[in-house]
Image (cartoon, rainbow, N blue to C red):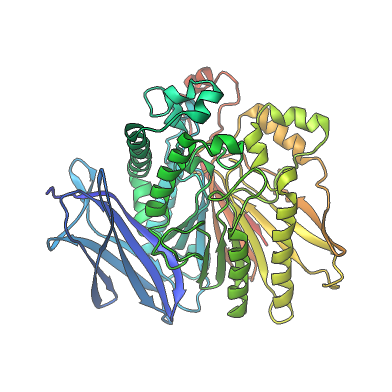
């Protein structure tokens, strides 16, 4: 047994408030020769210990899970923890001569307003884009690490914006599995077959094992290469939900006969297996709406201080004609559960991997001709405003407005949808124009978009198309029964609707009682020329910059 026996992790998860305590999970992948592990943690002067449960034995190690329950308290707390194996602190090698064996995280006071971080798109859609983007891959993860470390060193903050991040919400594409079709990868030979042969090709045990190893290796590579990312995953409690690239680009928005074929199903099985372990932290996650051993979807409901969080799983059961499947009923039940225990001052956050409000995919011929060059059909079909998803979108928006209207008589309630996917930062508002059931017309839903923390923004030509499409007036949404919503993308101080830089977002309620969204972004431009290689060479020593753009709601 080596002295640094953590293969992946620790992975620190947030599972919400239960029975007057905040539940956190700690998971890790050990080497195969480990037979038991303990979690030792310290809160103030109290030292505690719990045993890890073995969840799964994998080809590259064993996956373990333990929980920490921190009672709600009137003051902020810091929890320090270690993983013990044979009474020795387990670790991983940060560098050749440096081991990391202890971690800490922030648990806010019971009545405290908190600061959340939100990120998505933690990777590159192709090796070409990765090689030619001139900034370090994990530049923004380094910034998040620096911010969290500085705030943890001084927890006596005056404003919430200076508080440590109490949670990190990750909205999808935590890995990019698209390389599975590349040369030397498991499905390259399959991808070269005619479609008819692809649909009927059997999956041998050897191929299934190679597919399984591909997904495991992709997680290990994606989540261990950056010391900053590894710090954040171990030191900021996270809530994660997958999107298409965690499976394969466009999953759920491709023809049914393709996604139902044996090869695609084998791919989905392995992607789901490792998503369940590494992102959900196993089916024992107390936030899951479905608590069975084999849930049909992974939607979650959490209460956490001044937020209620509904996490939508829009990939597990997605088809070209339906996004949520059985998850819709659990989403509605989650709204009901949150409403029953709603407290004054709380905000509702709804996590949807793909935004509801984004540039309008107009049905006009000109806009479609402009868009189709940059968006494959499956990318367009991913969006809520796509024709086959429109009714489902209206139904969800109507439920959110009903939730808000029911609470409004007792306490003003703000509703936010937070999303990633589209590789830009943006925000917008749905406003009720007319609703006989709510004559005061006070209902509105804010859409926040932050994407991506690693994936670069669109290149200049596509940026022009996005700007042009965003100037098309968003049509009103008729929810039926006389309820009509208008949709508006918000402009920043410079008059821009989109931030075309890599970014992550931070959300908190300030002392002015407004919810502030601060996008942290790098200021280096992604190459503006189509010849990426020439542009990258001209920026061999790029001048990196970092700024924050904030908007109140």
- Residue 546 lies, with reference to residue 350, above or below; the image says above
Q: Is residue 343 visible?
A: no
Q: Is residue 358 left or right of residue 350?
A: right
Q: Residue 161: horizontal and vertical position, in percent?
A: 52, 63
Q: Is residue 13 left or right of residue 90?
A: right
Residue 264 visible (yes or no):
yes
Q: What is the quadrant of the C terminus in the image?
A: bottom right
Along the viewing direction, whichever of 265 and 467 lies nearer the viewer = 265
Could you say where residue 31 lies in the image, as x and y percent from the top left? 20, 48
111 with respect to 439 (left or right): left
Residue at point 67%, 38% (across, down): 380
Left or right, 115 with respect to 496, comes to left
Q: Quadrant of residue 96?
A: top left
Can you tell which quarter of the image residue 481 is in?
Answer: bottom right
Q: Reply above or below: 83 against 226.
A: below
The picture quadrant where one finds residue 157 is bottom left
Residue 77 at x, y percent in the picture: 37, 73
Residue at 50% in and 79% down: 111
| In the foreground, 263 or 1 | 263
Query: As rendered, which of 72 and 475 lies closer to the eye?
Result: 475
Query: Taking 205 as reference, is 36 above or below it?
Result: below
Q: How many marks?
A: 0
Image x and y of residue 226, in percent: 35, 42
Q: Residue at x 56, y 45 (%)?
A: 451
């Amino acid at each position: 047994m080596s002295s640094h026996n953590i293969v992946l992790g620790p992975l620190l998860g947030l599972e919400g408030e239960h029975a007057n305590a905040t539940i956190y999970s700690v998971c890790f992948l050990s080497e195969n020769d480990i037979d038991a592990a303990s979690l030792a943690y310290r809160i103030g002067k109290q030292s505690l210990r719990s045993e890890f449960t073995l969840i799964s034995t994998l080809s590259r190690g064993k996956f373990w899970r333990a929980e920490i329950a921190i009672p709600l308290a009137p003051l902020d707390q810091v929890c320090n923890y270690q993983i013990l194996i044979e009474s020795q602190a387990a670790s991983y090698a940060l560098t050749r001569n440096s081991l990391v064996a202890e971690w800490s995280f922030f648990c806010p006071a019971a009545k405290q307003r908190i600061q959340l971080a939100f990120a998505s798109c933690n990777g590159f859609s192709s090796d070409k884009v990765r090689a030619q983007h001139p900034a370090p891959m994990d530049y923004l993860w380094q910034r998040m690490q620096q911010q969290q470390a500085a705030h943890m060193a001084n927890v006596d903050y005056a404003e919430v914006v200076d508080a440590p991040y109490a949670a990190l919400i990750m909205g999808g594409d935590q890995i990019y599995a698209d390389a599975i079709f590349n040369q030397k990868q498991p499905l390259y030979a399959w991808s070269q077959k005619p479609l008819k042969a692809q649909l009927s090709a059997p999956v041998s045990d050897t191929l299934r094992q190679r597919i399984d190893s591909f997904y495991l290796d992709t997680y290990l590579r994606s989540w261990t290469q950056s010391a900053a990312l590894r710090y954040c995953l171990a030191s900021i409690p996270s809530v994660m939900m997958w999107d298409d690239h965690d499976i394969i680009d466009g999953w759920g928005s491709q023809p049914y006969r393709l996604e139902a074929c044996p090869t695609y199903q084998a791919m989905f099985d392995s992607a789901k297996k490792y998503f369940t372990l590494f992102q959900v932290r196993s089916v024992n996650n107390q936030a899951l709406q479905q608590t069975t051993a084999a849930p049909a979807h992974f939607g979650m409901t959490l209460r956490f201080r001044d937020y209620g969080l509904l996490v939508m799983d829009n990939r597990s059961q997605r088809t070209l004609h339906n996004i949520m499947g059985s998850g819709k009923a659990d989403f509605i039940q989650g709204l009901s559960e949150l409403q029953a225990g709603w407290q004054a001052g709380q905000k509702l956050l709804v996590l949807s991997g793909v935004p509801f409000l984004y540039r309008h995919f107009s049905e006009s011929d000109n806009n479609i001709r402009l868009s189709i060059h940059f968006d494959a059909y499956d990318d367009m079909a991913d969006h809520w405003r796509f024709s086959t998803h429109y009714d489902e979108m209206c139904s969800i928006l109507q439920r959110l407005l009903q939730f808000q209207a029911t609470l409004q008589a007792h306490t003003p309630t703000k509703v936010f949808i937070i999303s990633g996917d589209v590789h830009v930062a943006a925000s917008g508002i749905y406003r009720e124009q007319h609703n006989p059931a709510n004559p005061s017309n006070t209902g509105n839903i804010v859409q926040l978009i932050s994407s991506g923390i690693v994936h670069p923004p669109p290149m200049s030509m596509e940026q022009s198309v996005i700007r042009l499409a965003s100037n098309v007036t968003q049509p009103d949404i008729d929810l039926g029964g006389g309820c009509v919503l208008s949709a508006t993308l918000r402009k920043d101080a410079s008059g821009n609707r989109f931030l075309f830089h890599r970014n992550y977002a931070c959300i908190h309620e300030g002392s002015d009682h407004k919810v502030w969204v601060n996008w942290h972004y790098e200021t280096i431009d992604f190459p503006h020329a189509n010849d990426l290689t020439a542009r990258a060479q001209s920026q061999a020593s790029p001048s990196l910059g970092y700024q924050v753009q904030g908007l109140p709601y």
